[in-house]
Image (tube, rainbow, N blue to C red):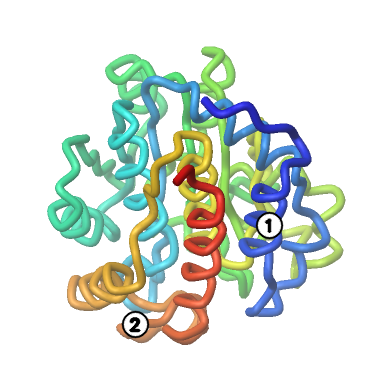
Amino acid sequence: MRALSLRSEPFQEIEEIITEDEGKRGISKRLNSYEDYWEGLQSLYQGKRVLIVTGFTVPECQAGESDGPLGAIALAKALEDLNKKVFIVTDQYSKKILEGLKEIKDLSGKIYSVPITVDKKELKGLLNLFNPTHLVAIERPGKGIDGKYHSMRGEDITAFVGDLDPLMEMAKAQKIITLAIGDGGNEMGMGKVREAGISYVAQGEKIFATSAADYLILAGVSNWGAYGLVAGLSILSDMDLLQDEKEEVRLLKIVAELGGVDGCTKVKAMTVDGLSLGCNLNQLLALKSVIKKNLSE
């Protein structure tokens, strides 16, 4: 591991890129903690077995959205390239997307899909089976204060969500380190900034998640947060682990072909959270530039 400090410039550059608020959500710049990114990154780099939880259902489309799976697969690939074991958990609406991306990226880790009616006993069994050192939630619904899952518009989507939220508290009880990536407030792990965040989000008191991760990364788009972790891992390991522009286009196309939709427009398109392909590629290229500048010759 390269000896780099908390305030090392490349990591601050990465944090600036992933928190750009192109979608005008209003919380990534206000609430993000650089220390959480830096400390979470270092912890993940030292991890051995990582359980990734992702998949946000769009009920009107009976499909998972494009934000989340792309970031999860990119992070999983980077971790496997660093010889770590990876296991991905989702539910039925995002399973096909993740399985397709896994095949394209040639990942060896398993993808486990829980039923909508999953109970705590089954979740405990998953933790015991994989025995992770880290749990990472990427754009996964988190329960509000009423015990229900909500969309950004305040709709109750509980009937379409496999109840994975208890995994975070179970993980903490077992001393498993937890990280979470979100962009709107209603994602697993975002409870860490609930008190400060509810005033910045429409219907925040209702939809803001209650589960709290040890390390929370607030991004303009959750995929960007995951890419930011990959960029950080690249610099720490002195290996470029992040896909290039051509691969990103290919993966976005696959997501749409497998039924994934833009969470904002509800359309099967090569966009994420209502942001154009070009906007998403700009963030990727900016991260690639930081990696390139900071790898050894």
Name which of mark 2 and mark 1 comes first in the sequence.
Answer: 1
Residue receiving disc 2: 270
Q: Report the residue at 61% width, 70% height from top.
A: 152
Q: Nearer the viewer, residue 15 or 237?
A: 237
Residue under pointer 1: 13
Q: Residue 288 location in percent, x, y?
A: 47, 62
Say left or right for 30 vs 107. Answer: right
Disc 2 element: loop
- Helix, strand, or loop for circle 1? helix
**Quadrant in the rendering for residue 113:** top left
Q: CA distance from mark 2 to mark 1?
A: 26 Å
Instruction: Tell me if mark 2 has few (under 14), some (14-19) or many (20+) residues whose alpha carbon lies within 10 angstroms of its own.
Output: many
88 is higher (above) or lower (below) than 98: above
| Image vertical order of residue 95 relative to residue 3, above or below | below
Mark 2 touches mark 1? (CB < 8 Å): no
The correct choice, above or below, for 201 with respect to 272 in the image is: above
Residue 185 visible, this angle: yes
The part of the image, by quadrant, that contains residue 253 is bottom left
Residue type at mark 1: give it.
Answer: Glu
